[in-house]
Amino acid sequence: MKKMTKATVAAASILALGAGAVAAEKLTIGLASEPTAMDPHFHNLGPNNAMTLHIFDRLVDQNEKQQLVPGLAVSWKPIDDLTWEFKLREGVKFHDGSDFTADDVVCTVERAPNVPNSPSSFGTYLKGKSVEKVDDYTVHFKTAEPYPLMANDISTIRIISDEVGCGAATEDFNSGVAAVGTGPFKFVSYTPGASIVMERNDAYWGEAPIWSEVEFRPISSGPSRVAALLAGDIDMIASVPTTDITTLAANDEIQLSQGVSNRVIYLHMDQFREDSPFITANDGSDIKNPLMDVRVRKAISMAISRDAIVDRVMEGVALPAGQLLPEGFFGVSDNLEVVAYDPDGAKALLAEAGYPDGFQMTIHGPNDRYINDAKIAEAVAQMLTRVGIRTAVETMPRSVYFGRASRGAEGDLPEFSFILVGWGAGSGEASSPLKSLIHTFDTDKGFGSANRGRYSNAETDALIEEALRTVDDAKRQELLAAATESAIENVAIIPTHFQVNTWAARKGLRYTPRTDEYTLAIGVTKD
Amino acid sequence: MTVFVIRRLLQALLVVFLMSLIVFFGVNVVGDPVYMLVSPDADQADIAAAIQRLGLDRPIWEQYLLFLKGAAQGDLGDSFIFGEPALQLILQHMPATMELAFTALFLSIAIGIPLGLYAGLYPDNPISKGIMATSILGFSLPTFWVGLMLIMLFAVELGWVPATGRGDLGSFLGIRSSLFTLDGLSHIFLPALNLALLKISLAIRLTRAGVREAMGQDYVKYARAKGLSTRRIIFVHVMKNIMIPVVTVMGLEFGSLIGFSVVTETIFAWPGMGKLLIDAILQLDRPVVVAYLMIMVLFFVLINLIVDILYSILDPRVRLQDQGS
Amino acid sequence: MTDMTSTSTPADMTAKVETPFQSFRSEFFESKIATVALGLLGVIILLAVLAPWITPQNPYDLGQVDVMDGRLAPGSEAFAGYTMWLGSDGAGRDLYSAILYGLRISLTVGVASGVIALLIGMTIGLVAAYAGGRIEAIIMRIVDLQLSFPASLVALMLVAALGKGVDKIILALVVAQWAYYARTVRATALVERNKEYVEAAQCLGLSRARIVFRHILPNCMAPLIVVGTVQTASAISLEATLSFLGVGLPQTEPSLGVLIANGFEYMLSGRYWISIFPGLALLLTVVSINLVGDQLRDVLNPRMKK
């Protein structure tokens, strides 16, 4: 993909211009959650990242499958072990008419990690990197150690204007003064809680949008969002509740678009405490943590019918999972299959591990974070109870859940024994979950920050770390796949399914689903 | 009177202080806001940095003292989520809620009193019985359930009004409100009706009870004996006597309208401060929750105070003194 | 009058031949609607109490709930062989069983919060009325302040600060409601304390406590019962609303309110039974309590007498 030339992009945009530029049409989209600011560096949060992408571009773009494609940079390559060279696109103009140059990149990289009051900073992706302007259309990114994921990290940063953006505060972006980018749409208005309006950037360097004006409206209640679409108030909605998909599919006036996301839903098991807080023997007495025995973890995996979860809980809108990312993503293993449902095998394995009558356990999960999260936790508990592991369910709002799940116990340790969580691979490849969920919890190296089960395996760690040092794509792909296999064979986590997202639009409109779950106006096309 | 006002305000400050204490510490016990904020990609160092930036690494009592210090200067802290002053956020969202609550109040009086009057005048009429039965439903059905039903009926099936959101704003006498445009009115109708349902029932019942009581009283009998027309008796004498208590009670219910707007705003995606509050609660945005609470307490105390002062001006028999009624 | 014990039903002063209770009873049953409502309420309470013995499934025992039974239409047969007359919800709970178990929780929440708030409010109100002076002024200021603040917001704030759970929601509802009782008791007690029988009792040298609890209190019971029924009904509704807002009770042991809140997402899906039946159960419960309360008010309020 990197080899795509300027000429092909230009050709594509000319074709698109011919098709749609004449139309003056407004598109209104209902969103489930709204961004917290128009400042692209304020809050590293899905809704913000999707919204700012309309106004701002990135050096390296992620397409709908999260593959890296040229954005404001036309090419990038490592020129030595510690330096990546990015060649910038020439002739691109900001919405205020000024030229895009290397200066804009340099000031963006300086501002992005340092936004005052930022709840979640983009420093995560820029740590250990420095930027250097070589000439107006060339920049160098340098690191202290060889770093293969440079382009992935850079693809999270939206480029703002040196003149109006870099010195501006978050309020200036919200008011529109500083919301000047190079993207396909220009800022018109932002009314928190009510609407965000944008108009077409006719001077856009890429494929011009077919919509002359776009309005986003946050409608957090699922049924209300569906009703607003049915009433004709809005043209399209994101995050269609699974409960309404069957009815909407039968409605001739509505067009559904579905696509698998980068988000895996999985079970994490306490593998570091001999005496796990939410596990007891059947009579309520303390027992040695059975989850430390790989046979028990395997048995749990076999006791879970992923098909039942997908069919019954998710109403068919999900994919059974056997690893960390769905097929097609970089670093996925070809050798892993979804674990088959085998309750008898699970019972036998439990008996072999010394638990012929099972034990008691509590599953904890959020109830407002993932699609149908509380129902999934309940279904898992039902299935485990059937093989003898009497499982209670406790679900809570994410505001309570994540803090406790991460460091609720004494010594800032994870509080729970057995939890339901999800992970979306923002970088679009397997190192993201491997680094954060599977690698040993290690504050110094910054690994395992979401490893709430504290799985720790030297062999898996070594594979992950080697992958993160390997710049060669083919070799890294192999290492990531091997690390995934090692983690799944040792049942570090139990993946249950990959989320599938659904968008619904009025007849005649179609959305190109994205694995990153973003809702972008540019992805809405007419039949 | 000055002493009275000052004393009242001091009491209000005490209540604000106590409530802020409870909520400040309470929200802190419930969960850890940091994990609501940081990106999943953040590593341990990023998380530690975020905790420090929000001041959450300090002991809770120290955070509270800092908050009090700021509050004394009118700074209620910045929202964890939006990074903006919590006070400013709430004031931004307040007009939408006020306009919704006032419209609902107007609807409940405009619909409730005539219906209640009818039911009170003809208590044995089947229509009256129907009105009373429906008013019980108004009390009993959960607001969120009715809200979605209203959307399904009026917006989806009949297509008369939009399903969600606030319409265009218009200006009148320097006030910007969606009540001054047609688009705005069509948007506010359903949410205001939904919010008003409970109060319509209340107005019906109050009016009916008042009318029934009044009709049996001497002054009505006397007016009848004098040969006044029924119409005149009802609209001049009876109404005059029941309107004041009914409207007063309804006015006092204004607070509860603001309370229930949390639900209505969620269903109708109304950009008011109720929605802001519930989002803040669900995301542990402590500064916004605490600031909302403090503003509301002050708001209601002020309303009460104004009502009391007005009474004392209108009715010389009422003397302002610091006692419950 | 003065010998009435505190739990007896309030008396009708005009009755000469019948005992007060008999007259109260006959007046109450004059209204057909109220009679039906009382009967219905009796049945509802009975069903809730008997739930474990008359339902095919224990919805809290995950060994008995099967996700494969999820979203079955009314009348379908469950995997375990029994018929789900009201259908099942998304998790595979038999709605008939879940509603009866949910009723238990909702009634417990409503009644427990009502009774506790009544006891607290009553005590505070009586203290205020009897003590008078400065204490009364302070107490009534607090009551006024509390009443000026919407109960729904008080409950919402408290549940947000306390977290989920039956005990926490009861506590939140008590805090939100006690002031109504305090105001009612004080208002009634004020009238009573100026009556002759209290003066007579004082002259006899009876202790304050005795006068308050044996003499004034019984006379406050009538309005208290009326306020109590209304507040209990509103507590049940408020719990449903809090659950809808995501701060109420845990989803796996659903109250009626949680069942309705869960059913909310199915309202447009064509699977009407998931939200309609629990909604209907809540409606019947709240309406019958309100109707009984209405009639009690009419019977106990001498001014409404014909």
Image: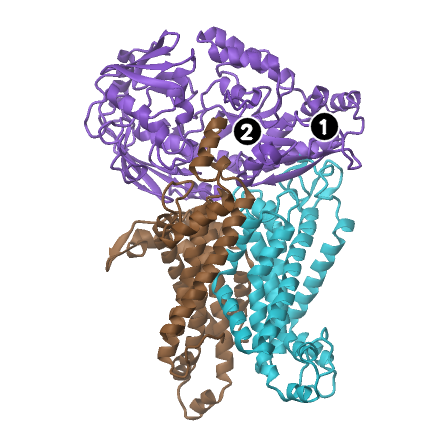
Disc 1 crowd, CA 10 A, few/some/many (<14, 14-19, 20+): many
Amino acid under disc 1: Asn
Residue behind mark 1 = A289
Q: Residue at x 35, y 12 (%)?
A: A84
* Chain holding disc 2: A
Chain A as rendered: colour: purple
Q: Could you say which quadrant of the image residue A101 lies in?
A: top left
User: Helix, strand, or loop for circle 1?
Assistant: loop
Q: Position of residue B210 (x, y in %)?
A: 49, 77
Residue behind mark 2 = A422
- Answer with left or right where residue A188 lies relative to residue B138: left
- The quadrant of the image that shows the C terminus of chain C is bottom right
Between discs 1 and 2, the one toward the N terminus: 1
Q: Residue at x 59, y 85 (%)?
A: C194
Q: Could you say which quadrant of the image residue C38 lies in?
A: bottom right
Q: Residue at x 71, y 30 (%)?
A: A275
Q: Position of residue A200 (x, y in %)?
A: 26, 31
Q: Is residue A521 visible?
A: no
Q: Position of residue C58 (x, y in %)?
A: 73, 44
Q: Is residue A148 visible?
A: yes
Q: Position of residue C202 (x, y in %)?
A: 67, 86
Amino acid under disc 2: Gly
- The quadrant of the image that shows the N terminus of chain C is bottom right
Q: Which chain is the one coloured cyan? A: C
Q: Residue at x 53, y 64 (%)?
A: B134
Q: Observer-nearest residue: B282 or B116?
A: B282
Chain B as rendered: colour: brown
